[in-house]
Image (spheres, coloured by chain):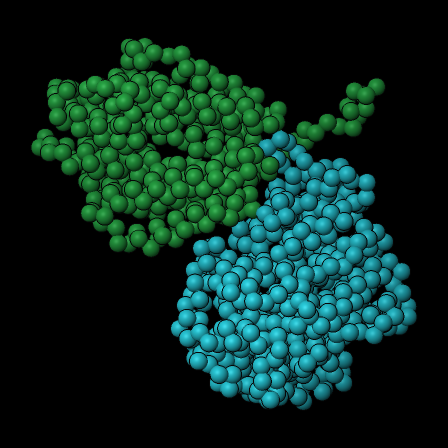
Chain colours: A cyan, B green
Amino acid sequence: MHESTDILFKPAIFDEMHSPEGLVRNQYRDVAAQLFSLPLEALSQKQREAEVLFRRLGITFAVYGEGAGAERLIPFDVIPRIFGASEWALLGRGLKQRVQALNAFLHDIYHAREIIKAGLIPAHQVLGNSLYRPEMRGIDLPNQVYAHIAGIDLVRVAENDFYVLEDNLRTPSGVSYMLENRNTMMRLFPDLFASHAVAPIDHYPQMLLDTLLEAAPPNVDEPVIVVMTPGAYNSAYFEHAFLASQMGVELVEGQDLFVHAGKVYMHTTEGPQQVHVIYRRVDDDFLDPLAFRPDSTLGVPGLMNAYCSGGVVLANGIGTGVADDKSTYPYVPAMIEFYLGEKPILSNVPTWRLGKTEDLKYALAHLPELVVKEVQGSGGYGMLVGPASTPEEIAAYRERILAAPAGFIAQPTLALSTCPTLVEAGIAPRHVDLRPFVLSGKEIRLVPGGLTRVALTEGSLVVNSSQGGGTKDTWVLED
Amino acid sequence: MLSRTADHLFWMARYIERAENTARVLDVTHSTSLLPDDSVGAEAHLWYAPLNISGCAAGYTAKYGAAESAAVTRFIALDPDNPASIYTSLMLARENARAVRGAITGEMWESINATWLELNRMSPALSGNRLTPFFDWVKERSHLFRGVTLGTILKDDALNFIRLGTFLERADNTARILDVKYHILLPSVKDVGGAADYYQWGALLRSVSAFEAYRKIYRDVISPQRVAELLVLRADMPRSLHACLNEVDSTLEIINGSTGREARRCAGEIHAALHFNLIENIFANGLHEYLTDFLGRTDSLGKEIRSAYLARRDEFVAPSPVRQMAQVQ
């Protein structure tokens, strides 16, 4: 038996399962009773079964720098993370609001630039950003949607107190793990689902397909949608293939496509077939060797021209990076108020932009307490977690900051919430975050759930899979 | 369907079928080798056959020298350096499947992926007395994959290209098995009807799962001419050339598109020749000559299929708006 009192948690840190008094929260009560009455060995056994399933299904991600074809499993934790219906309702509203404002911002900065004129964001922050694509100026996208698929990283520090850590508007990944985690949990613990009203998420691929269909250029009767992947050795290839097959559309590589007279076609066994919407999982820079990196072999020559002339729709659009860039992040609450006239529901983390003299001064004086990130970094690479770093690491990072201060932001170290997790020593609290996926078409949609990532190392705040983080199934209980 | 997808499906199927046939060849060679034969060079003579069938004799000789059972078996079954080994075939089958995971069913991928994982687990421990179970396992995995495919995949072009790959490869492999065995067996003509002859032709029939069929159809001593008839001309024999070309021909008829005219003509020609030929005619001109010609023709057919459907052509062939307008007016 594992009494809840066995589980250690620091009082200041919000525990997803336990109230500060050590009681199990309502939504966890039955799960805790059922899972924790199992011997630890039985749970570990389930964990191993899950691994076998994931390996067998090939739910892996490719690892760079470990030789061609190196594939790794993302560790999967069998203890779910659970939200109550009202908690989720709040989050859902906050997410829709945020994504709506971000899309409005993108439309604005490539058109009238009202927000700059209003003085709410400096012109150089937008126009001087290397992720701003002047080619996109004045181009009208269907439904004015730029980021059709957004992955918003959230952390929780208290009851009903969520912070957005990062907006991902380029090629956010992880949704296949959200879906496969659920499948795996249902195979391993059918009883848990029988006794809980867990809101289903399996309709995500249908929702994604609807979103992409709505994105099609006007006056196309039966839009042809494809998923575009960099190829089988990309770290997220499993997800690309998974989504294409779940939606019943072709999974294409750049070499399968060509541009003719402003339209995009794919090579098929029946000859060329026109493509109307490309859900591309290839970065802007690699999409078109004529427009961007000439050395890219992943792209399609002429694609950018076809896109700008309305011959094809890309999801996500080109030039969305300027809105999810970490130096733009501090302005998102202002965007929400400016475009929607509403108070932001989800909080931003206080952020120091080290390009500003006073912010830099503050950050340099407080490095051991702060998290410092590269403005354009991703995947948890190249960040400094002050409280977890040695004086030598901090000194070395200080040099990097001083060399190019504008390339960094700093934030206070958040007390990320923890969730009970099965680790070698037993069940112990580990820090978690959450990435829900928000879809923008004619309307904004999301399924009740997301990808919960968990830092498996004790005390670690870094949950990225490329840094050894794991994942959990995320439940939203229906009322 | 995407040309690249069709290409991967076609080759995925070919490699699975090839692995199965290679296991069949090794299995029959292995059981033939159990028969006492004291003549000089008998072992080398026998073990060259599978190397010849899979076209990897030169690679083997460079690495090992004389043909000898353990080395040949290891080379053909498990050597990753041998492009024709079972190991390489299963690896390439999986690589092709992986490239088109979206186009095959989850069960198909699980089956092919599990085969590959299991192969890697068991291959280090593989030695002499484990061989027959290993060959059986390869055949079983191939049967399973075929069953999973037929039981789960939509009957559309994906299945059509899988079938094309399967039956083209099988036709090629059966022709090779028959050709090389024919040559091995010829020297022993002196005891036609003897125990050894019976055993060897029996082993050949078993290698293509045709022993029971032979018994049922001919109810008589096993003769080379009848074995050849069974494996070349009998349309009801699942691994015969005729049966394979029936499938190739009818599959090509189903596949849409105007680009495959030459491939269809080519397949129709080979098919018609099998349909109307007599084994006496084939033997009059020499079985070996016939099979060599057949292999050349199926190779050309493979090339036609590739250029019609699988290769990506850069020229744009959709009707231009001008021509469409001209037609309307």
The tally of labels here is 0
Answer with left or right where residue A345 lies relative to residue A61. Answer: right
Residue B104 in view here: yes
Q: Is residue A295 above or below residue A381?
A: above
Q: Is residue A420 above or below residue B104?
A: below
Q: Residue at 79% x, 63% y: name it.
A: A100
Image quarter of residue A433: bottom right
Residue B205 in view here: no
Image quarter of residue B292: top left
Q: Is residue A205 above or below residue B236?
A: below
Q: Is residue A240 above or below residue A348?
A: above
Q: Residue at 82% x, 55% y: name it.
A: A144
Closer to the camera in the image, B142 or A150: B142
Q: Residue at 17% x, 25% y: name it.
A: B198
Q: Quadrant of the C terminus of chain A?
A: bottom right
Q: Residue at 29% x, 36% y: name it.
A: B24
Q: Where residue A106 sits: x, y (%)?
A: 80, 61
Q: Where residue A310 sits: x, y (%)?
A: 79, 45
